[in-house]
Image (tube, rainbow, N blue to C red):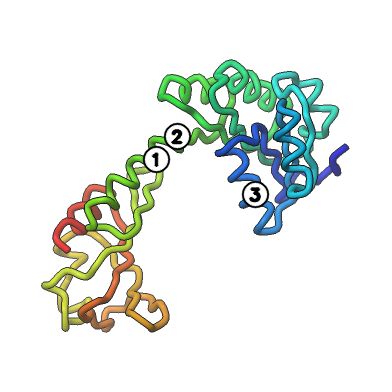
Amino acid sequence: MARTPSPDSDNVVVIGLGRFGGAVAESLARVGHDVLGIDQNAELVQSWADRLTHVVQADSTNSDTLRRLGVHEFARAVVGIGTDLEASVLTVLALSELGVADIWAKALTSKHGRILERTGAHHVIYPEAAMGERVAHLVTGKMIDFIEFDDGFAIVKTRAPREALGKSLAECSLRSKYGITVVGVKRPRTDFTYALPETRIEQGDLLIVSGPTKLVEAFAAIT
């Protein structure tokens, strides 16, 4: 039986230990969180036994089963169930019935995501779509890294535009011209520097830029 964590703890239950759920569980464990992993597949459960705080084979669609495992004491849950849409939805419903305060769930399609939201998921993740969009931004070479948030806000790492070279941020006025904010500058073989008005941009500098997604994309396109 898993330890009973306090409701405001950082402990997390991850249900579905396939490729997505397993990656989430492993990352959480690596940064120090206690993780309870649940999956119906005995082989998967066995493979994770030595890597997570506690792993059990169980039917996650049954709220009574989840209660016996102490899941109702967890403040956060991640549902990483893949192709079994019914199990995914019923698991979110069971977690919601148990009163889990913060439910994250993987969705395969927008319709699946809407159903998850209606059955109690507080956050719906579309990992395949998100990765596809990220790769699309990176493959052109204009962006070196790209992160987009739910509200149409993005952070990117990109090369400095030619017009900014040899000038300070105040002099090149990138924010007023493009509607973006330069958060920091990474120069080869030097430490990351938070951007200030007097920060000078040199050849080879990488910029960490934030702002509305469309404006950030347009800025990266000129680099």
Label 2, residues with CA under 10 Å away: few <14, some 14-19, many ≥20 = some
Q: Which residue, as the protein is rendered here, is positioned at the far left?
A: 163
Location of residue 207 by image quarter: bottom left
State the mark number for residue 130: 1
Q: Measured from the top left, where is residue 83 in percent x and y?
A: 54, 23
Q: Which of marks 1 and 3 is in front?
A: 3
Location of residue 58 by image quarter: top right
The span from disc 1 to disc 2 (Cα, nearest Å) is 6 Å
Label 3, residues with CA under 10 Å away: few <14, some 14-19, many ≥20 = some
Q: Measured from the top left, where is residue 93 in percent x and y?
A: 64, 21
Q: Is mark 3 on a helix, strand or loop?
A: helix
Q: Measured from the top left, where is residue 46 in percent x and y?
A: 77, 37
Q: In this view, does 158 lie above or below 184?
A: above
What residue did someone put label 2 on?
126
* Residue in the image at 19% along x and 58% along y: 219
Q: Is residue 148 above or below residue 170?
A: above
**Going from the N terminus, do you reach mark 2 or mark 3 first?**
3
* Residue in the image at 35% along x and 40% along y: 132
The span from disc 2 to disc 3 (Cα, nearest Å) is 19 Å
State the mark number for residue 26: 3
Callout count: 3
Q: Is residue 201 above or below residue 60?
A: below
Tag 3: amino acid: Glu
**Going from the N terminus, do you reach mark 1 or mark 3 first?**
3
Q: Is residue 117 left or right of residue 184?
A: right
* Residue in the image at 75% along x and 41% along y: 36
The answer to whether the residue labelled 1 contacts the one labelled 2, judged by CB atoms less than 8 Å apart, is yes
Q: What element carries label 1?
A: helix
Location of residue 71 by image quarter: top right
Q: Nearer the viewer, residue 8 or 60?
A: 60
